[in-house]
Amino acid sequence: MRAAVPRLTLTPLLEIPEVIAGSDLARLLAEALRNGGLEPRGGDVLVVAQKIVSKAEGRVVDLASVVPGSRARNLAALTGKDARLVELILAESTEVLRARANLLIVRHRLGFVVANAGIDRSNVPGLPGGEAVLLLPRDPDASAAALRTALGQRFDAAPGVIVSDSFGRPWRRGVVNVALGAAGLPALLDRRGEQDRGGRRFESTEVAIADAIAAAAGLVMGEAAEGIPVVLMRGLRVSGPASSGRSLVRPLAEDLFR
């Protein structure tokens, strides 16, 4: 007998107002859920775009307030980027991995290998007298956990929460949504020791559940002016101990490319 195949639904949360520093994001999400006739159930996962999390947490920086140092100016000359932006990239990073014209790839302080330290200029409201950019949350796992707790206080069931962003990947073209932070679900599912249908034991299989969910939600969110920052996934059947988004970051000791 075939195992039952889960039926997944991905529902966008609409009419979320513009988020600014200090916005009660959990309240806005709860209102959007109720307005959409959605009551969180056990097993639901709410995927929240990093951008609105960062805005609510006040991670907007006015470039006019940034004074670039000599290293930032040198890298700006090499890459053609704004020296003030480069200064912020360096402040958010632990290592510069690649720098050339129009390209600056770094290891973010949270461990992500990403262009421009994930700093974003798109869909960020301007600031008087300057230009606004948006940094990643200081601790995406803590952000996800706080949202999950606050939603659990407003509903009978607390959904899993993923804070997602679109990243490029080594040796692959294009961007795809990945999980920066996660709470209330197995972000990384260890299947080592299990057997396939032929009885062969898995020796190294770990499944990036949170990244897969984020990527699916990204198809609904879009990458440009769609204005859909939150998606509710329902119907996922996965069991295992909850783990954080940080569990998805490969340790430096396992870097196979250097």
Image: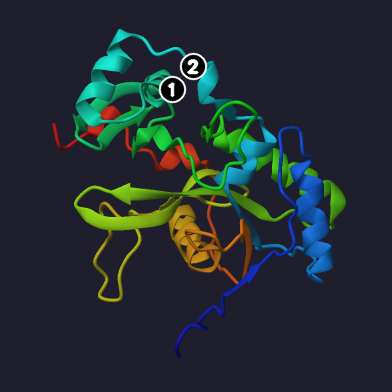
User: Can residue 115 be seen at all in this image of the molecule?
Assistant: yes
Q: CA distance from mark 2 to mark 1?
A: 8 Å
Residue 129 higher or lower than 5, as above or below: above
Are discs 2 and 1 less than 8 Å apart at CB? yes
Q: Nearer the viewer, residue 12 or 149?
A: 12
Question: Residue at (76%, 63%) from the top-left corner?
Answer: 40
Give the class, few, some or many, for how many residues have Cα within 10 Å of label 1's Cα (few <14, many ≥20).
many
Give residue 38's quadrant in the image. Answer: bottom right
Residue 1 higher or lower than 56, as above or below: below
Q: Nearer the viewer, residue 20 or 97?
A: 20
Q: Which residue is mark 1?
A: 88
Horizontal and vertical percent position of residue 87: 39, 19
Going by the picture, which residue comes out furthest to the front?
A: 129
- Nearer the observer: mark 2 or 1; the answer is 2
Label 1 sits on a secondary structure element that is helix
Horizontal and vertical percent position of residue 59: 60, 30
Residue 43 higher or lower than 87, as above or below: below
Tag on residue 66? 2
For the N terminus, give its image quadrant.
bottom left
Q: Could you tell whether 88 is left or right of 24 in the image?
A: left
Question: Residue at (35%, 55%) from the top-left corner?
Answer: 175
Question: Residue at (48%, 83%) from the top-left corner?
Answer: 3
Give residue 34's quadrant in the image. Answer: bottom right
| Colour option used | rainbow
